[in-house]
Amino acid sequence: MYGALFVGQLWVKEELRHQGLETKLMLKAEDLAKESNCSFIAVNTFDWPGSFRVYKKIVFYVEFERHGFDNNSVFFLRKDLKHQNQY
């Protein structure tokens, strides 16, 4: 989408979590973005326990935060891809 890859949803069943699947899926998305010559990847997440662990591990950063949702905020995360050599 206009030089970026947007991940609309990433959900792993609770019994399958903590096996590295989330990271593997996001790295596959990153490979696809690089193959498509995208400049960055964007993903949104609620402030759920552990939701940032995966994204921080693979160098996403909070671009901005939207407050006002019941119980949580939504974080808009980004990972720039141009001029990167490794994860």
Image (cartoon, helix red, strand yellow):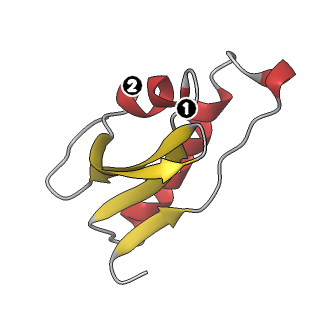
**What residue sits 72% from the left and 42% below the top?**
11
Q: Is residue 20 above or below residue 38?
A: above
Q: Is residue 27 visible?
A: no
Residue at 60% x, 45% y: name it: 70
* Above or below for 42 versus 62: below
Q: Position of residue 30 (x, y in %)?
A: 44, 52
Q: Position of residue 71 (x, y in %)?
A: 59, 37
Location of mark 1 (residue)? 23
As helix, strand or loop, the secondary structure at mark 2 comes to helix
Residue occupied by mark 2? 57
* Residue type highlighted by circle 1: Thr
Residue occupying the far left of the picture? 83
Question: What amino acid is at disc 2?
Answer: Lys
Q: Residues within 10 Å of mark 2 (few under 14, many from 20)?
A: few
Q: Tell me, for residue 70, which label it has, or none.
A: none
Q: Within the image, what quadrant is residue 12 found in?
A: top right
Query: Which quadrant would the N terminus be assigned to in this image?
Result: bottom left
Label 1's element? helix
The residue sitting at 55% across, 32% down in the picture is: 23
Q: Are marks 1 and 2 in contact (CB under 8 Å)?
A: yes
Picture quadrant where residue 48 is located: top right
For the point 73% across and 21% down, which residue is it? 17
Q: How many marks?
A: 2
Residue 7, position as x, y percentages in the image: 54, 59
Q: Residues within 10 Å of mark 1 (few under 14, many from 20)?
A: some
In this orientation, which residue lies closer to the viewer: 9 or 38? 9
The C terminus lies in quadrant:
top left
